[in-house]
Image (cartoon, coloured by chain):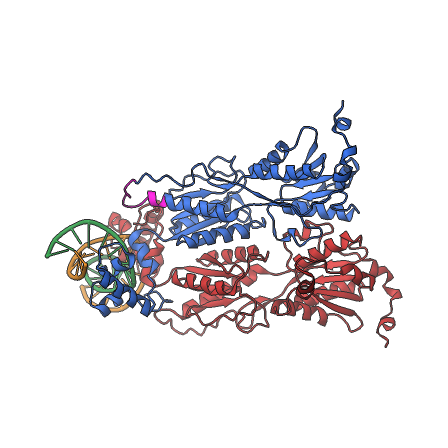
Chain colours: A blue, B red, C green, D orange
DNA sequence: CTGAAAGCGCTTACAG
DNA sequence: CTGAAAGCGCTTACAG
């Protein structure tokens, strides 16, 4: 008997009711044909003694552990807890537990982490992959949450559309000179966001992209981004691909005596915890992680059903996720005033764009 | 057979070697007496075919799932990922998987979450409890990570001592007028940190405690904390019980045109991800989460061993954690200059404390 | 030192 | 509609 469970088993119910444990199993699962009357008595008894099935016994018999693995890329990414929560929630709705495995920022560990999960016989794995890693066939259902432009992506936020929302918002405030801030040019997520932002801005808008990694490679980790100089050059908005970079920009600007949002606007992505804690609050774009998690778990559940030890009759039900792996993002506008809006009339695009 | 495992089992090794599966089991576990020569051949064969034991089979037999549960209080707390990572790491070192369960900020869900884990037959549970909840006897080993002053606490950072470090640091910079910022007066962790800070300051230092919840109850969520007025009243340092509040203070001060660290110092707790991303970086105090996690997992492992289905001979080995549940914190001083230091000589304590 | 047997708790064909 | 039997993969006394 498992150590931590009150010792109630199928066969105890069976003997106490004078029936076979097969019948108890059938009644409780609703599978086999059991008379309604007997089934009721069995369910009543089960409730009475507080029976909970042993997952270990079931797993051994069915080959299904009812556990999913969750592989996360880098703990430093503050989006992690939200994803973990969303997955845990969706999984437990669907009757799965969630085993976590962290790559700790190293690609090699991602493989290790996946292997640990495989050894524990998880039924499927949700992977938020590390940059540039392609998840090989694991012989086990996998759902990848990355970006729509990543091959092998199962479901993710529509980062491109999110970028467009930011662009429209800033344009609406009258901004005509915008700096986009990214950290890593090889990230599909970031490229989607930046691409979306660019695509949402008219050609009259002056856009410059700042890659933090490039600056840091020359000036060292955590160095100033030189935003003051950009303000001097007439830029009035800083749109970062993450709230962390937005925060960095905000404090660097404030520290230089530049007022946000009066002098310049700052936007981020993902609505992380500090976006409302700072003054002024950050305008940002939120992912619908609940939906993303549901779709990911659903995709796994479908794959698991398909891989069934005994084939399920082909009911023609398609995998729910196909083509739906692009979940819209939502703008959270918190900085809604901008000096530019008032003065934008005097800045004719022609002034700037004329050769 | 489990669906996702390459079909290698004990008995396959056994038949391929012409021995019994009991012997294979013994050789692989090193328990029963098996001749060195045979054991070698068995291990070789196991390695050759890439044998990994079925945890389900083992669990059913031994009553041990080799899985720990991790119950976290509120996803909004950005310390979460670090704790989760530390626990996952320590657990996997000790041969355990980690099943997560999130309380989503509600006390009722904490109980639900624990029950879900119990139903999955975890061998033990690490709980970071919600404020004011006492974990009842679950009939299953539990390690509580909270604060040394919480009854039932198993292991945690020495928040009081951490507070003292902050106090010494600020005093060393010459600060004589310090505001402590807390969010919740019922939190043991926060009270420890604040108590520690107070205890580390001489009576000549003017100290005022700001409870954010009190301010927000009157002025609404996310309202300004009125720090500018405090600066006008002569306070030169703001020591928050968390980096989030430190960030809030920093941006509110900067927004008001007050310079950090030239005019005032700001400190936080926990060294969260943004503490180096902001300008200026935050001085903060770091928890040794790796050690805390190791001790928590070790405590569980010991309890699990004691609860063994068949009693282990009393070897007299005490639970390793007893009395050691208070892990020192480390100051990370990032704001090391302060105008006060230079001008502190003109501020005699007697000026302020005279009646 | 090695093996045969039992059994952990469950589910699934298969009989009746 | 119900039950007897087998078996998932493992470990543990117990014989030999």
Which segment did they paint magenta? A303-314
Residue A211 visible in this rendered orientation of the protein: no
Q: Residue furthest right?
A: B346
Q: Nearer the viewer, residue A11 or B52?
A: A11
The residue at 31%/67% (across/down) is A8
Residue B141 visible in this rendered orientation of the protein: yes
Q: Nearer the viewer, residue B226 or A229?
A: B226
The residue at 76%/63% (across/down) is B170
| Residue A158 position within the rendered picture, expressed as x and y whole percent measured from the top left | 54, 39
Up/down of A37 relative to A100, above or below: below
Q: How many marks?
A: 0
Q: In the rendered view, does A289 fall on the left or right side of A171?
A: left
Q: Quadrant of the C terminus of chain B?
A: bottom right
The residue at 87%/67% (across/down) is B347
Up/down of B184 relative to A287, above or below: below
Q: Residue furthest bottom?
A: B355
| Residue B98 position within the rendered picture, expressed as x and y whole percent measured from the top left | 46, 57
Q: Residue furthest top?
A: A355
Q: Is residue A313 magenta?
A: yes
Q: In which image quadrant can residue B149 be found?
A: bottom right
| Residue B21 position within the rendered picture, expressed as x and y whole percent measured from the top left | 27, 55
Q: In which image quadrant can residue B229 be found?
A: bottom right
Magenta stretch mostly in which secondary structure? loop
Q: Is residue B38 magenta?
A: no
| Residue A65 position within the rendered picture, expressed as x and y whole percent measured from the top left | 36, 53
Q: Nearer the viewer, residue A32 or B202?
A: A32
The residue at 40%/53% (across/down) is A96
Q: Nearer the viewer, residue B354 or A347?
A: A347
Up/down of B341 relative to B273, above or below: below
């Amino acid at each position: 008997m498992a150590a931590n469970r009150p010792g109630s088993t199928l066969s105890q119910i069976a003997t106490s009711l004078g029936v076979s444990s097969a019948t108890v199993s059938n009644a409780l699962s609703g599978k086999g044909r059991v008379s309604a009357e007997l089934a009721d008595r069995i369910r009543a008894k089960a409730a009475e003694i507080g029976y909970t099935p042993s997952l270990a016994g079931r797993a051994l018999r069915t080959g299904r552990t009812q556990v999913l693995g969750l592989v996360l890329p880098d703990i430093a990414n503050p989006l992690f807890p939200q994803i973990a929560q969303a997955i845990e929630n969706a999984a437990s709705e669907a009757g799965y537990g969630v085993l976590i495995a962290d790559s700790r920022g190293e690609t090699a560990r991602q493989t290790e982490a996946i292997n640990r999960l495989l050894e524990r016989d998880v039924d499927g794995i949700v992977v938020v992959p590390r940059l540039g890693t392609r998840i090989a066939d694991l012989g086990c259902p996998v759902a990848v949450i990355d970006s729509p432009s990543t091959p092998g992506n199962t479901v993710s936020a529509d980062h491109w559309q999110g970028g467009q929302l930011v662009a429209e918002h800033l344009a609406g405030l009258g901004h005509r000179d915008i700096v986009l801030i990214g950290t890593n040019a090889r990230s599909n997520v970031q490229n989607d966001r930046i691409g979306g932002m660019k695509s949402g801005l008219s050609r009259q808008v002056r856009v410059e992209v700042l890659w933090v990694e490039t600056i840091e490679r020359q000036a060292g980790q955590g160095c100033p981004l030189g935003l003051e100089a950009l303000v001097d050059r007439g830029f009035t908005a800083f749109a970062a691909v993450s709230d962390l970079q937005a925060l960095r920009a905000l404090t660097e600007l404030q520290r230089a005596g530049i007022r946000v949002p009066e002098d310049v606007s700052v936007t981020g992505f993902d609505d992380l915890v500090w976006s409302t804690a700072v003054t002024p609050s950050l305008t940002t774009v939120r992912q619908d992680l609940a939906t993303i998690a549901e779709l990911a778990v659903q995709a796994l559940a479908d794959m698991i059903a398909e891989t069934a030890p005994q084939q399920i009759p082909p009911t023609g039900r398609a995998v729910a996720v196909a083509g739906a792996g692009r979940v819209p993002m939502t703008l959270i506008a918190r900085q809604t005033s901008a000096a530019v809006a008032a003065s934008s009339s005097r800045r004719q695009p022609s002034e700037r764009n004329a050769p």
